Amino acid sequence: MQEKTPLEIKEMMASNPILKIVDVREQWEFDKCHIANSKHIPMGKIPDSIDYFEGSSEYVIVCHHGIRSRTVALYLEQNGVNNLYNLTGGLEKWSDDVDPDMEKYR
């Protein structure tokens, strides 16, 4: 797993249209705001969704502040998933650096 800043993730998204963004927050958080075209798999559902993470795809794991997503990325890595990136600072930092129109919440 690698840590990537919001600006680095934005660049990756521009150069890799099949990059998969996985949002591990709760439903109410996802409903408030999320990165377009991201896949919502709440943290508690990750073990049941391990088959989603297959092949040579690259995955960016996202949460509110980057803590839950780091935990999920480490879990996935321990279970054989490669090509994982954690969005450092989460959507809070994403809204500061990339999308200032994104709704913030506490």
Image (cartoon, rainbow, N blue to C red):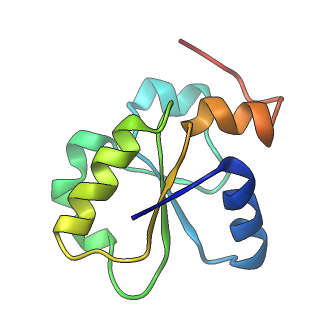
Q: Picture quarter containing residue 95?
A: top right
Q: Picture quarter containing residue 78?
A: bottom left
Residue at x 46% of width, y 81% of height = 57
Residue at x 28% of width, y 74% of height = 81
Relative side of 99 to 22, left or right: right
Q: Is residue 101 above or below residue 22?
A: above
Residue at x 76% of width, y 77% of height = 15
Q: Is residue 89 above or below residue 21?
A: above
Q: Position of residue 89 (x, y in %)?
A: 56, 37
Relative side of 22 to 4, left or right: left
Q: Position of residue 53 (x, y in %)?
A: 33, 72
Residue at the outermost bottom position: 56
Q: Position of residue 6 (x, y in %)?
A: 68, 48
Q: Picture quarter containing residue 80?
A: bottom left
Q: Is residue 72 above or below residue 17?
A: above
Q: Position of residue 49 (x, y in %)?
A: 24, 61
Relative side of 89 to 35, left or right: left
Please give the count of numbered marks on the rendered protein.
0
Relative side of 98 to 45, left or right: right
Which quadrant holds the N terminus?
bottom left
